[in-house]
Structures are given as structure tokens and as C-alpha cells.
Image (spheres, helix red, strand yellow):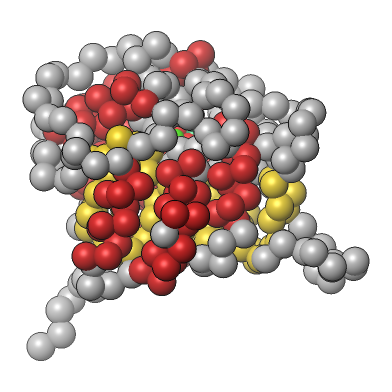
């Protein structure tokens, strides 16, 4: 007899936890459609040590202390790390303090954990990348054959239009543009979940109240994190008043239910030159690009998301 549900999608998450990475981890750890094989950490929103601590703490709340966590890159491929604690708070979690988790990351570097996890998997894995892409770029450069075991990379990063850390650059790509260029150029099927869906998918106060009313600790934490985000930190008018963006958690929704997305295929390039455009993703939406010599490979770019279904997926799963 056929099973009524398809088998869960095996995934690895790469995170820089981060308020919205925490929301993403809670969703991924809870939803039965995903099977988390490992979580790898990179410096981004806060330092690597803080990211690792936050990640272990969030997984403990989600009752997923069985998931191996790897500590990875302490900074980008080029230059020094630059964090986003002005948005995420000094501890990266909106100054919400989590209970002690009593766990340590695995003894090997995150890139090694990624390699091992891919190698040991009987089927290709989906990488959900929610941080600067340093760990993923290192994996692709150090172990090129690992590409065969990657089903696809779904990454939160970039923008079709306006940026958030500069006028044209989104934080994850801006924080390590060379790494993003390596990933986009890798030939691995890639989906870019950029700032357009990142800010479009939000929770209103009713949704936050529903989470707060749940008996589940994961739902309570989600309500507190979303409550922090309703103050409009860093959104520059891109989110309606009283709403909290799901941010990275929307990327997880996109893997759980791709039917909530409108996706276009387009060549995507990263601006690497120093100056005001560094870290911009150049998404070529022309139907018939002219002067195609050297045109970058096409990737899937999320142009829109069904906001109500995305929110219902998040709230319904956690509460
Ligand atoms: C991205 O940058 C980080 O601050 C968030 O966690 C998200 O991954 C948004 O630009
Ligand atoms: Ca993130």
C-alpha cells in the first residue's frame, strides 16, 4: 500500500542564528516534511561562537538535540567579518535568553560535517543556506565531487531590486560576495530566495498571539522572536506596521511547499568590485539577453510568495 505522505526531504541547514534563522530552525525542526541531517554555522549576524550557542539553544527548545551542529567559518573568504547585531541584538536573538543547552558542536569543522553528511547520505541532500555562503563555497572548492550529492541549494540572499545593508546589496551576499559568486557559478541547481519574498512573508499580531497561546515551547519562542521583529528593526518601511517578517523562515517554507512560490529563471551575477555596488546580485530579467558572452548561468529566483499560505504554514506547524 502506498504511504499517504511522501518521504521527508533530507536537508542540511547552514545558519548564522540570528532572530530569523532561529525561526527557520524552529520550523525546519518541527515540520514532518523535512529530515534535518545536520546544521552548520557561519559567522554572520553575530560572531561564530554566538551563532553556535544560539543554534544549539534553539534546537534544544525544538527538542532536536539529536541533530549534529558544526562550527564553520569565522569570517568571509575575503576581508573581515561584519555583523548585523544592530538588527538582531547583541546576542543575535533580540536579547532573548535561552535556557542552557549543555551541548557542544561536533569536533570537526562545519565543512567536514557537510562533506561527511553528504557522503553518508543514500540520496542527494538539499542545502538550505541562510547565512553568508562561506561554508558552502569552501565545501564546493575543497570537495568539488560533493556537488553530485547536493540535490539543490536554496539560499536566502540577494535581491532583484533594493538591498537592505546598502542601497543595492542584501546582507548575506554583501557579507561574503566571493562565496556567493562561487555558489552561483557552481552548476548546482540553485534557488535564490531574496529580499522580495523575505520581507513579503509576514506574521500579523493575530498570528503571533496564536503562537503565544500554544503549549509548545517552540511556539512560545517563535512568538517572542516575532514580537521582537514587529518593532520594524531595519526593515525601512518594507513590512506593514505591526507585522513581523518571517525572513529566513520563509526560505524553509519554500522548501516545504514550493507551490507557494512564483519562480523565474534568470542569470544572476554578483558585483565583486570594490565600491557602492559590491555585493549586489545582478538579476537579468530580460527575456532575450543580448551580448550573452560570459553571461552567468541561470538560477531560479523567487519573484513572489503567497503570503497567507506561507504564514499559515509557519503558524500551523509551530502551534
Ligand atoms: C539576511 O541577513 C541576516 O541578517 C538575516 O538572518 C537574513 O539571513 C537578510 O538580509
Ligand atoms: Ca540568516
Q: 44 and 36: which one is in front?
A: 44
Q: Going by the picture, which residue comes out furthest to the right?
A: 291
Q: Residue at x 51, y 66 (%)?
A: 188
Compared across the picture, whether 4 is left or right of 165 comes to left
Residue 50 vs 265, above or below: the answer is above
Answer yes or no: is residue 92 visible.
Answer: yes
Q: Residue at x 59, y 33 (%)?
A: 78
Q: Going by the picture, which residue comes out furthest to the bottom?
A: 1
List x then y, in percent, for residue 44. 46, 28
List x then y, in percent, for residue 66. 11, 45
List x then y, in percent, for residue 190. 53, 61
Q: 202 and 150: which one is in front?
A: 150
Residue 167 vs 180, above or below: the answer is above
Q: Residue at x 46, y 63 (%)?
A: 144
Q: 219 and 107: which one is in front?
A: 107
Quadrant (top left, top right, bottom left, bottom right) of the C terminus: top left
Answer yes or no: is residue 300 visible.
Answer: no
Q: Quadrant of residue 51?
A: top left
List x then y, in percent, for residue 181. 63, 50
Compared across the picture, whether 57 is left or right of 253 comes to left
Amino acid at each position: 500500500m502506498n504511504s499517504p505522505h511522501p518521504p521527508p526531504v533530507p536537508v542540511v541547514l547552514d545558519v548564522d542564528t540570528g532572530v530569523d534563522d532561529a525561526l527557520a530552525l524552529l520550523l525546519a525542526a518541527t515540520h514532518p516534511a523535512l529530515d534535518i541531517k545536520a546544521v552548520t554555522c557561519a559567522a554572520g549576524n553575530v560572531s561564530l561562537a554566538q551563532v553556535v550557542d544560539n543554534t544549539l539553544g534553539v534546537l534544544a527548545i525544538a527538542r532536536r538535540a539529536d541533530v549534529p551542529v558544526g562550527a564553520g567559518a569565522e569570517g568571509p573568504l575575503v576581508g573581515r567579518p561584519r555583523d548585523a547585531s544592530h538588527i538582531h541584538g547583541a546576542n543575535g536573538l533580540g536579547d532573548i535568553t535561552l535556557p542552557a543547552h549543555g551541548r557542544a558542536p561536533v569536533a570537526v569543522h562545519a565543512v567536514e560535517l557537510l562533506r561527511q553528511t553528504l557522503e553518508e547520505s543514500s540520496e542527494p541532500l538539499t542545502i538550505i543556506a541562510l547565512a553568508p555562503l562561506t561554508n558552502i563555497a569552501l565545501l564546493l572548492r575543497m570537495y568539488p565531487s560533493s556537488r553530485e550529492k547536493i540535490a539543490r541549494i536554496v539560499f536566502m540572499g540577494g535581491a532583484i531590486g533594493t538591498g537592505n545593508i546598502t542601497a543595492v546589496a542584501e546582507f548575506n551576499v554583501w557579507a561574503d560576495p566571493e562565496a556567493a559568486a562561487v555558489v552561483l557559478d557552481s552548476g548546482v541547481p540553485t534557488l535564490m530566495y531574496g529580499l522580495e519574498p523575505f520581507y513579503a512573508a509576514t506574521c500579523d499580531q493575530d498570528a503571533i498571539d496564536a503562537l503565544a497561546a500554544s503549549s509548545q515551547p517552540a511556539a512560545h519562542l517563535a512568538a517572542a522572536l516575532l514580537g521582537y521583529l514587529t518593532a520594524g528593526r531595519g526593515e525601512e518601511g518594507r513590512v506593514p506596521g505591526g507585522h513581523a517578517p518571517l525572513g529566513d523562515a520563509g526560505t524553509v517554507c519554500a522548501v516545504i511547499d514550493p507551490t507557494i512560490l512564483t519562480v523565474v529563471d534568470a542569470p544572476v551575477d554578483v558585483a565583486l568590485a570594490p565600491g557602492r555596488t559590491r555585493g549586489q546580485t545582478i538579476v537579468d530579467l530580460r527575456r532575450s539577453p543580448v551580448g550573452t558572452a560570459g553571461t552567468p548561468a541561470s538560477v531560479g529566483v523567487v519573484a513572489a510568495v503567497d503570503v497567507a499560505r506561507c504564514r499559515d504554514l509557519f503558524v500551523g506547524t509551530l502551534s
